[in-house]
Image: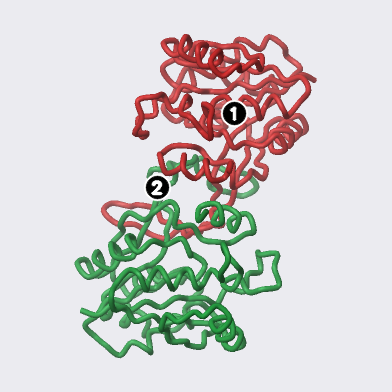
Chain colours: A red, B green
Amino acid sequence: MSNHVIIAAGGSGSRFSSDVSKQFVNLAGKPMLMRTIEAFHQSFEKINIIVVLPTDQIQHWESLCEDHNFDIEHKIVSGGLQRFDSVKNGLAEVPARDCTIGIHDGARPLITPELIRRAFEHASENGSAIPVVPVTESLRQLEGGGSRTVNRDEFRLVQTPQCFKAEVIKAAFETEYDASFTDEATVVEANNTPVSLMDGDPQNIKITTQSDLELAEKLLS
Amino acid sequence: MSNHVIIAAGGSGSRFSSDVSKQFVNLAGKPMLMRTIEAFHQSFEKINIIVVLPTDQIQHWESLCEDHNFDIEHKIVSGGLQRFDSVKNGLAEVPARDCTIGIHDGARPLITPELIRRAFEHASENGSAIPVVPVTESLRQLEGGGSRTVNRDEFRLVQTPQCFKAEVIKAAFETEYDASFTDEATVVEANNTPVSLMDGDPQNIKITTQSDLELAEKLLS
C-alpha cells in the first residue's frame, strides 16, 4: 500500500513578525518547510510528497530550493483560499485508491520519522490516525465575561500528520467548505466517519510565533 | 504592600522516570527548585519566599542547599496530603493582611521575574491574577468512546504564579479540601469570588516528564 503526504504550507504568518512567509522562515539554517519535507523523506523509502503552496509563492520556493541545493523530490500544487481548498487540491494529485494519505502542517518541522511511521501504520489499521497529546496544564473555558475550570483529562491537543485511508479522506472531501472544518479530522467526522486518536509527540510543536521559532531552534540544537 | 510567594514543591514526580523527587532533579546544573526560587528572588527587592516541601524531604533539601552554597533566604514549611493542604500550611506563615500572595508550582523553573512582577501588579489592582496562554492547537474533548472538536478560542491553558490579595486567598482557604480544587483559582471561585485572567508566557512550562526536562534544558542553554 503506497504512502502519500500532503504538506499544507499556505500559512500567511500573520501572527509572525517577519516579512517572509512563515513556512520559508529559517530554522537552524534552512527554511522550516525543507525540514518538514526531510522528515517525511526519511520516514519511508518511498513516499509521495505533495507540497501545497500559495500560487504567488511557488516561484520563490523553487529559487529557495536551488539556493539550498534541496533535491528531495516533491510535487508542488497551488493552494486555495482555505486550508480545506488547499488539501482538496492536494488530494486531486493522489489518483491511487488503495493507499494511505497523511496531511501535515508545513509549520511543524520538528515532526520525527518515528511519529510519521506510527501514524501511517495506525491509519492503515484503523482507517484514520489523529495524533494527540494530553493537556498538562489546568484548562479554563471562557464564558461570557468570565471563565471556569474544565476537567483537562477530558481534553486532548491535536497535532499532525492526520492520516487516513484514501477512501475515507477522499469521500469526506467530496463536499463544500464549511467554517466548522478546522482540520482534516473535522471534515471526515462531518461525513459521519468517526476518527481514531493515537499518541502524538509533545515536541512536535506548531511554529506560530517568534517565541515558538526560538523554542524550535533550541530543540534542534 | 508586601509581596509573598508560596512555592508548592510537593510533587512526587510519579510521571517522572527518576528516583529523585521532581523538584530536586537537576536542570542545567542545579535542582530545578533552586532556579524557581532564584526567579522570585530576582523579581522584587524584598519578597518573602515560603517553600512547601513534604516533611520527609526537608532534610534532603537542606543538604542540597549546603552542597550548592544556595543562600537565598526562604522559609521551609511542611506540606500536606493535597496541594490544597500544602498551600494552606504556607498561607499560615503569612500573618500580614494588606499584602499580595503568589502561589507557584515548584516545577515551573522557567518563570521569569518579568512575569512574576506583572502577575503581582495585576493582582494588587484586580484582586487576583491567573496567568493564561492561548491554546494554539486544535482541541478535542473525549466523549464516551469517541471525541469531538471544540472551539479552542474559547479555552486557555493556566499557569502559575496565581496571585491574590491576601484577603481574597485567605478567606477562600477557610474551607475544607474538595476534589474540585485543581488549583488556587478554583478554591477562590468556590468562595464565590471571580478571578481575573492575564497573559502568561508560553515558555513558563511545567516540568512533568523527562521530555519536558530536556526541553527546559534547551531553553536555558
Total numbered badges shown on the rendered structure: 2
The image shows residue A218, relative to residue A22, as above or below, that is below
Disc 2: CA contacts within 10 A as few (<14), some (14-19) or many (>=20): some
Q: Position of residue A188 (x, y in %)?
A: 58, 28
Which residue is tagged 1? A36
Point 51% across, 33% down: residue: A27
Q: Is residue B168 visible?
A: no
Residue that numbered label 2 is attached to: B134
User: Relative to A38, is B26 above or below?
Assistant: below
Mark 1: few, some, or many residues within 10 Å (few <14, many ≥20)?
many
Where residue B48 sits in the image (x, y, percent)? 34, 81
Residue B93 lies, in percent from the top left, at 37, 89
- In the image, residue B76 sits, relative to residue A76, either above or below, namely below
Q: Which mark is residue A49?
A: none
Q: Quadrant of the N terminus of chain B?
A: bottom left
- Residue beneath the point at 68% across and 9% down: A95
Q: Quadrant of residue A3?
A: top right
Say which element carries label 1: helix
Of residue B39 and residue B165, the one placed in the foreground of this image is: B39
Q: Position of residue A24 (x, y in %)?
A: 47, 24
The residue under the point 67% across, 37% down is: A112
- The type of residue carrying mark 2 is Pro
